[in-house]
Image (tube, coloured by chain):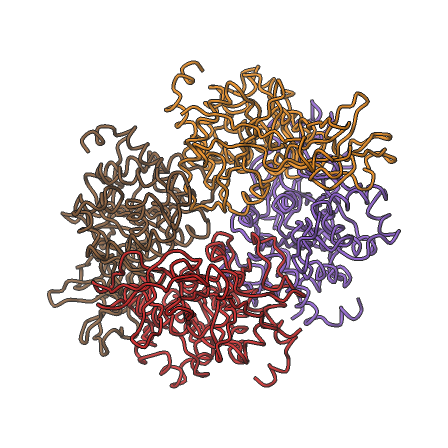
Chain colours: A red, B purple, C orange, D brown
Amino acid sequence: MAFMLPLYNYPDFKQPPLLDAPCVRFEEVKQPGVAPEYYHATSIYPEYFQIRQGEWFLLRESRMDCVVVQKEDGDLVVTEFRHLKMGDLVALGRQENGEEGIFVHARPFDFNPDIPQKFAFRSRTTRETSFSIDYDELYDLLEFERQNGFIVWVLGPAVVFDRDARDAFVELVGNGYVHALLAGNALATHDVEAALFATALGQEIYSKRSVPLGHYNHLDAINRIRAAGSIQRAIHEGAISDGIMRAVIRKGLPYVLAGSIRDDGPLPEVIADAYRAQDRMRSLLRRATTVIALATQLHAIATGNMVPSYKVGKENQVRPVYFYSVDMSEFAVSKLADRGSLTARSVLTNVQDFAVTVERGLRKRYSDSFKKG
Amino acid sequence: MAFMLPLYNYPDFKQPPLLDAPCVRFEEVKQPGVAPEYYHATSIYPEYFQIRQGEWFLLRESRMDCVVVQKEDGDLVVTEFRHLKMGDLVALGRQENGEEGIFVHARPFDFNPDIPQKFAFRSRTTRETSFSIDYDELYDLLEFERQNGFIVWVLGPAVVFDRDARDAFVELVGNGYVHALLAGNALATHDVEAALFATALGQEIYSKRSVPLGHYNHLDAINRIRAAGSIQRAIHEGAISDGIMRAVIRKGLPYVLAGSIRDDGPLPEVIADAYRAQDRMRSLLRRATTVIALATQLHAIATGNMVPSYKVGKENQVRPVYFYSVDMSEFAVSKLADRGSLTARSVLTNVQDFAVTVERGLRKRYSDSFKKG
Amino acid sequence: MAFMLPLYNYPDFKQPPLLDAPCVRFEEVKQPGVAPEYYHATSIYPEYFQIRQGEWFLLRESRMDCVVVQKEDGDLVVTEFRHLKMGDLVALGRQENGEEGIFVHARPFDFNPDIPQKFAFRSRTTRETSFSIDYDELYDLLEFERQNGFIVWVLGPAVVFDRDARDAFVELVGNGYVHALLAGNALATHDVEAALFATALGQEIYSKRSVPLGHYNHLDAINRIRAAGSIQRAIHEGAISDGIMRAVIRKGLPYVLAGSIRDDGPLPEVIADAYRAQDRMRSLLRRATTVIALATQLHAIATGNMVPSYKVGKENQVRPVYFYSVDMSEFAVSKLADRGSLTARSVLTNVQDFAVTVERGLRKRYSDSFKKG
Amino acid sequence: MAFMLPLYNYPDFKQPPLLDAPCVRFEEVKQPGVAPEYYHATSIYPEYFQIRQGEWFLLRESRMDCVVVQKEDGDLVVTEFRHLKMGDLVALGRQENGEEGIFVHARPFDFNPDIPQKFAFRSRTTRETSFSIDYDELYDLLEFERQNGFIVWVLGPAVVFDRDARDAFVELVGNGYVHALLAGNALATHDVEAALFATALGQEIYSKRSVPLGHYNHLDAINRIRAAGSIQRAIHEGAISDGIMRAVIRKGLPYVLAGSIRDDGPLPEVIADAYRAQDRMRSLLRRATTVIALATQLHAIATGNMVPSYKVGKENQVRPVYFYSVDMSEFAVSKLADRGSLTARSVLTNVQDFAVTVERGLRKRYSDSFKKG
């Protein structure tokens, strides 16, 4: 069944209390990186700011826990505290119903009444929740997004610890279901290790054989890439003949490898500064229409912080941003489910099976897309 | 690749210390259900008892934590303490190296040196372990066992909470990969609920819709089966048109539904007495060559207690009994992994994905078996 | 701070729709153990049945997922399906608002407005939830219940795997904070094993040393108790000099050991029949005012099924029944939290720490109770 | 019982194969940050390098997965790959038994034979492992280290989500059981939030009440600290009147707050660059004799990577470095347990209980230390 975007429920500003709402107030930043008292902090929802009587401005490319800065041209920009500059005009107000000129639209979408469960079901999700429909909907969503959206995958290293999962993800890249990749040093390191030595942390990724001196493999992989100058150069030199990083790079897809204190190396492409990495991640996430996070609490939560529940497209259409988190632990996924959005979904399973199942499901359902590659 | 059984490593009783070992001693039971002091307790391994000088008797249909009773005809029978009768002769001895006439054979199989990892790999298994090879080996094993073995599945209710997993398991039954089923009241109840109402605990097993008054559904399901007299009769009357219990019963496969204190109802076929249920389970497990336990700690551990690591076949061939446990939690599967057997495997994943993946994998790899049904 | 019971919120039957409600209908059982169609199934809440116009009968000693049988004297008795006899009159109706003569009272208690969080807070509980207040409230509750209530503990075997936890629980028994014990064969077996050999499953419960041939210890423990005839007799004979079972038995507290298919032995006191065990558990739970379940999914869920959220005391006072579940896993405790009752609480932690902390906390806060013993 | 350090088992270089071993070879770095082929990578164990015939050099302040650089004065320094400079001399060799001039000493300590379990027990640790002895040993160890060692705590934010745990840790700081703190932005943020608003993520840390507009609290906390310039300044200005950061800072203890992509803010003291943070962490960990990591996979693993299993003290005494990881999940702690060191311990529990229990245990056992403060 073809995927259909839900309709956006446009707020009616002609009705009270919004009709009678004041304009939003702004105050100047007096200290770099510090917001004025009573700043407004953003949510994951569409938010409107009445900047002139009768004119409500919808935030674009929002994210939660930031402030709203008015530019000279009147534009409102969702800005991290650390990016505030002297003199920036920051929106004030903490009421969400319009009485301070701010309307937070917590129920933005009319989910199709004929298929009310589609992306509308919410309850406590556990390992015993049925996930058949989630897979089926995800196939349709990914096929739709392949052509109409921007699909960002967030990967923990577990995806490359297993041969079939790694191969499946490479297929997804090759067939157009991946538009950007967010990960850390470990994902890239063990993916390269698999390409060079067929191991992850010294264990073969299919046979599970522990190879002699295998604990050197990930260090050797890093050292060689550092010698080559970048993963990209190593690929061009032919040193890396398979894997996720190769598929992503050869296809010219954007990716961010964010550094962390756990890292060996790091690989040359890894961004050491956490906040510069955050900025780079957000620059990709501004385009995201669907995000799928696999087995990485750190990167999944970071991404969840930076991606709103909606996206404003061309011609001001508003559509949801879908967010999937896939993990083995109820504790992990509940951290993201608490975002409270109808567009967030959790699947409790091993990401190896998830990757393999999604690739097979798409191949079966949309074999034409696979033929076209 | 066709599955090959590993060779059995026959002990050499012509070498010391076994050559010089005494015969095993026996002592009479003086109180029903109570073993004499210094009884020998069985393990999961092949165990030999020297009953006459030079004659070593290999236990058949063993299980761990039981005693060994010598019958009048000289046969040695592995017996639960609770089944000991006055006058039974119980083997004595706690040394495992022959010095009390008992040899416990802890490394019974020569795993094929060309594929040493096959069923030979042991280490700490976690969600980050690679499982691709486990699936592939399992396909080959199941295809082999379909014709040459006896495959016992142990199911927790999660398998019927999801439409695709339930359907996949029905396919496995239909195509000959299931020879017996061990489960509890809940598995059968929610399977029947799904057949009657398309729900599990009141939630539709595909759409996840909560239906009105859905909390009555499992009670209504039980009540109707109780009215019919048995699941079997309800099936014959046409009341149950799909599901695992129907597939199992129509195929005439043996099954045990063991009662527990958690149960509603229970369904008529459920065995209330825990130890009678245990006896029935063991009577099936005596025949088991492969056991696969999905998402049920109680039944999986119970089964693990009752199934040895080997089976003596016709013409006294000795082969391994394979034991898979599939669960989301390292804690759960490590309880079984601690059995210490080379023939025990764990897969950390959601059993929904596991069932669907195994069915698809078998279908792809052994499509001929599927055609034949 | 002394514990205070919340006030019961008596329903007003003089107001519509209850004022205009019909009397509840009953129908005869026509097949033993089978309820008539459209039977009413009980919940964990107080339920009222209008048996004569203007006369609403409050169920006593209720439990969920049962039917309601009217006795000859007009009394309504909450009855398991399996106990239905020919001719029993079973209440009909599935609406909960009175329109079929049945009123399910889902908000029965006015929690004290000065301490509104007390037993009133509900949200998703995880390992990161703050539990300080839960401990403090539990101390006050247990001290109150020690004298005014009936505290039932439901124990998994983990409590006796650790010396300090086992000792702490023995102290709780000795000082009056335990009125009944529900457990399985394993709890009693390893408790006795600890008394006889200072081990659990062959590992010393303090030093963690694995003792030689330690895997015999639990079997020897069971065998000796079977030889003695009962735990009670073994205690009287002086064979068991410490532990939980000894403390419980010497104090004359009621207990139920329910059998399961996992059991070795079993110990003589263990009830083999799951439903007879359920009946025995329920007979104790009818008196329960607080239930605390530690690290046992099977017994905790079974108990949760059998205990309502309220108790009718002398002089028809209605009070809550508090239910605590303590476990390491969000998945496990959420199964009970889903009961939806304000009187259910979860603590995510290791039960070893829980037992030790509760004992210390009570000792510090209510040292007088400890002096009195 | 007073804690005693185990004796160091000095290797005997007068015996073959060490007697006949060659000197270790070195090779120049030809590209900054890239090691020469066949570099030797360090382990967590004591490692000796034969730099002149008969002269074996023991690495000091080692860490795993680094290379060994010979300085001009002959000193060997364990160096991260990223710190390699042109011309640095890097040790070569991957054999660990001396045959390349390198001896990795994998069994360095003679654990006291009278108390062989002390810090010597290793097996699979689960939530059902007994932990009483671990607590007792930890009390003795901490009291010893308080005066003779350097205790580094690694804290996840869960420690400040609960009032009692936060208070307990403040007591540990006040009484000398904390010598350095490693954490992230979240720990400090929610600790400051608790000081300013008595909440964590908007929920009161004792009552669990969700306060109005509470989701602003952590942002307000960060914003105020950023306005003040640093946590330290905010403390000196009196804005922060309790908590862990205040206790640590007022006592002048060193701490590292490492940034991550999940962070809001960040707080001024947070180090944005992951590898500069790593360097700062390591500079503290060089002094560590005991490390205790609570509920933080990221920081715990990062720390585990940087701390060896031994420390060379004054007068060249070699002693163990103890490493505790405390977490709710077997998966999390097994990542560290796999370090394979006898000096690594895991406790499976909620860190709230752990902190409270350790503080109480120390107070009871070493009340004199508490009096002295």
In this image, A328 relative to D278: left or right? right
Above or below, A108 relative to C342? below
Task: Return the residue nearer the eye: B55 or A3.
Answer: A3
Work out whether C155 lies above or below D58. above
Q: Is residue C289 left or right of residue A213?
A: right
- Quarter of the figure that contains the C terminus of chain C: top left
Which residue is depicted at the point 40% across and 15% down? C371
Q: Is residue A40 left or right of residue A295?
A: left
Residue displayed at 62% across by 31% down:
B39
* Residue C107, position as x, y percentages in the image: 59, 36
Of B27 and C244, nearer the camera is C244
| Image quadrant occupied by the N terminus of chain C | top left
Q: Which percent across, then down, holds residue A271? A: 31, 71
- Residue C212 seen in render: yes
Residue C284 is situated, as x and y percent measured from the top left of the image, at: 63, 25
Q: Position of residue D162 (x, y in %)?
A: 37, 42
Residue furthest left in the image: D73
